[in-house]
Amino acid sequence: MAVKVVAYILFITAISGALANDPDLLQDLCVAKPSSGIKVNGFACKDEANVTEADFFFAGLAKPGQINNSVGSLVTGANVEKIPGLNTLGVSLARIDYAPDGLNPPHTHPRATEIVYVLEGTLDVGFITTANKLIAKTITKGDIFAFPRGLVHFQKNNGDKSASVISAFNSQLPGTQSIAVTLFTATPAVPDHVLTKAFQIGTKEVNKIRSKLAPKK
C-alpha cells in the first residue's frame, strides 16, 4: 500500500513539470501504437475504439528485479514502451534495485528531470553541474532526491544490504545515456585516439575497458 501511495505522489510531482519537456496533450488520450511504424516526437495514436484498461496498467514494479550484472544494479522501467497509455502524458516511473555495494553508474536522462524515493536501504547519490560541481548526499528509506534534466548523476549502495528506489520522470520516455557504455561501446566505435586523449590512457586500457563493458553474447 505504501509503495502505491509513493508512486502516486511521484506521478503528481512529475506531472507538474511535464510542460517543460514533453509536449502538452491536445486530446484526452493517445495510446501508443508502435506497430504503426510512425514516430514523430511520440508514437501514433491507437484507435480509441480499441483502447482498454490494459493500455494503462503495469505490474512490473511491485517486486525487486533479478540483478545479474557487474555493476550490481537493475533498472526496471515503466515508460510508454511498457504502458502505451502514457503516450503524450509526459510522465513515467522506474524501479531501481541495488545489490550490496551496487552502483547505478554515472549517466544522464536527456529528456527528463528525475526524482527518486528510497523504498529500502541507504544510498550515496549525486549529480554534477555544468560548472563541474558535485552535489551529493547520503539518503535512506523515506528520503527523496532530485536529479536535474541532462546532468550526469549516479546512485551507489555502500551498505551490506540490498536497496531500492522508485524514480519518477517528467517524460514518457526519458532516455538514458550511461557515460562509460556510451563512450566505449558505441557503434561504430569512438576512435581510440579520442578516448586515449580524453582519459589520458593508452590503447591497451581502452581495449580492456571495451572488453569489460561489451554486451554479453
Image: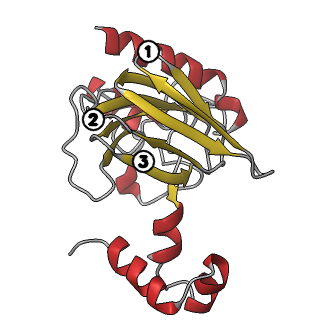
Q: Residues within 10 Å of mark 2 (few under 14, many from 20)?
A: few
Query: Taking the image as drawn, is residue 47 in sight?
Result: no
Amino acid type, residue under disc 1 in the picture: Gly
Q: Nearer the viewer, mark 1 or mark 2?
A: 2
Relative to 69, residue 182 above or below: below
Relative to 108, residue 122 above or below: above
Front residue of this view, candidates 202 and 129:
202
Front residue of this view, candidates 203 and 110:
203
User: What residue is rendered at 42% in x and 86% in y?
Assistant: 207
Disc nearer the start of the sequence (3/2): 3
Amino acid type, residue under disc 2 in the picture: Asp
User: What residue is rendered at 67% in x and 39% in y?
Assistant: 21
Q: Quadrant of the C terminus?
A: bottom left
The label number, if any, that marks residue 104 in the structure image: 3
Residue 192: image quadrant is: bottom right
User: What residue is rendered at 66% in x and 42% in y?
Assistant: 149
Q: CA distance from mark 1 to mark 2?
A: 19 Å
User: What residue is rendered at 30% in x and 71% in y?
Assistant: 215
Disc nearer the start of the sequence (1/2): 1
- The residue tagged 1 is 142
